Amino acid sequence: MVPLFFAYFSLVSIAAGVLTVALRNPVHCGLALLTLLLHVAGLFVLLNAEFLFAVQIIVYAGAILVLYLFVLMLLNLKTDERYLHAHHVVILLAGLAICGELVLLLSQSPYLGAKGDASAEAILKTGPSHAIGLKMFSDYLLQFEIVGVFLLGAIIGAIVLAKQPKEAEEAR
Amino acid sequence: MTIPLSAYVLVSAILFATGLIGVLIRRNFIIVLMSVEIMLNAANINLVAFSHYLDSMAGQIVALFVIAIAAGEAAVGLAIIIVVFRGKISTNVDEMNLLKW
């Protein structure tokens, strides 16, 4: 059963990724991205990461994607005749070179590493969110605080950037 | 029958390559940001897969941080798009070639 689900989730997420890049209408691209995010969340379930599954659905599909769709609808972008970058041939060659390097590195990888202490049985004993919480608020506390400060900076930055300039407000 | 780790890495590599090509060749700024999200998701699949196969919690926690930073990146990126659009500049990446100072 698990290989069947893995094949479904991976094939649909790859197809949705290709559609996100290839479709012409930005709103359709957003919907394809939503499909991709939901199926990646399915892959997380197969990997015993139930907490990340929930976070992926709530934060990515629920918040980030809605933000994208809001901006798309607010800006009312017209679909262009030409949808590729002006110098896309040259840039595509560079991108393919990077992809080739990726394949080369993957073919040499041993896919091994040092085993940790969180085996599947140990996680299932108390549940995945318990295991993540214990680890995050002990070993990764500093990183957690840094992410909090980063998010505060991102909020302030977004507000400052998107605020109406003073002259435009007075001209109304 | 269990799925090998390399299968997950392969899926994530294909998704990453798709996102990379999208960032490089698309013209619309918003689609470029969406392609960045695809690349971040590919990295997340990799992190969670290695965390599962190597019995370690670290990968999942880093994946959580990646999601948080993706949210911040989306907020700031979309705010920049709104500013650029308000200045009557097109939101095509190959036509935005002027900075103020």
Image (cartoon, grey):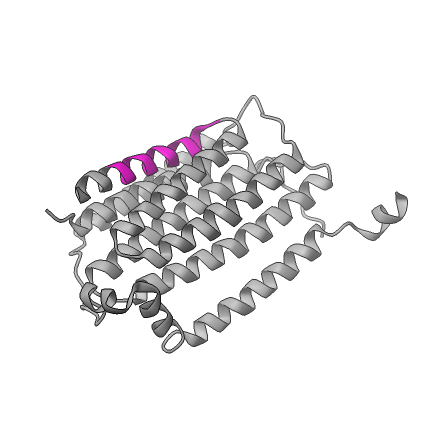
- A159 to A144, vertically: above or below: above
Where is residue B82 drawn, in percent x and y? 66, 44
The picture quadrant where one finds residue A11 is: top left
- A30 to B72, vertically: above or below: above
In the rendered view, does B16 fall on the left or right side of B89? left
The tally of labels here is 0
Where is residue A116 drawn, in percent x and y? 21, 70
Answer yes or no: is residue A101 visible: no
Where is residue B76 drawn, in percent x and y? 59, 53
Residue sitting at x 15%, y 56%? A110
The extreme right residue here reads A171
Q: Which residues are magenta?
A: A8-23
Residue sitting at x 57%, y 36%? B94
Q: Nearer the viewer, residue A28 or B34?
A: A28
Q: Nearer the viewer, residue B27 or A156?
A: A156
The picture quadrant where one finds residue A123 is: bottom left
In the rendered view, does B101 fall on the left or right side of B61? right
Answer yes or no: is residue A67 visible: yes
> Is A22 covered by the magenta stretch?
yes
Where is residue B31 drawn, in percent x and y? 51, 37
The extreme bottom residue here reads A138
In the rendered view, does B94 fall on the left or right side of B42? right
The extreme left residue here reads B1
In the rendered view, does A9 fall on the left or right side of A76? left
- B20 to B54, vertically: above or below: above
Most frequent secondary structure within the magenta stretch: helix
- B88 to A169, vertically: above or below: above
Q: Nearer the viewer, residue B33 or A96?
A: B33
Residue sitting at x 42%, y 58%? B66
> Is B31 covered by the magenta stretch?
no
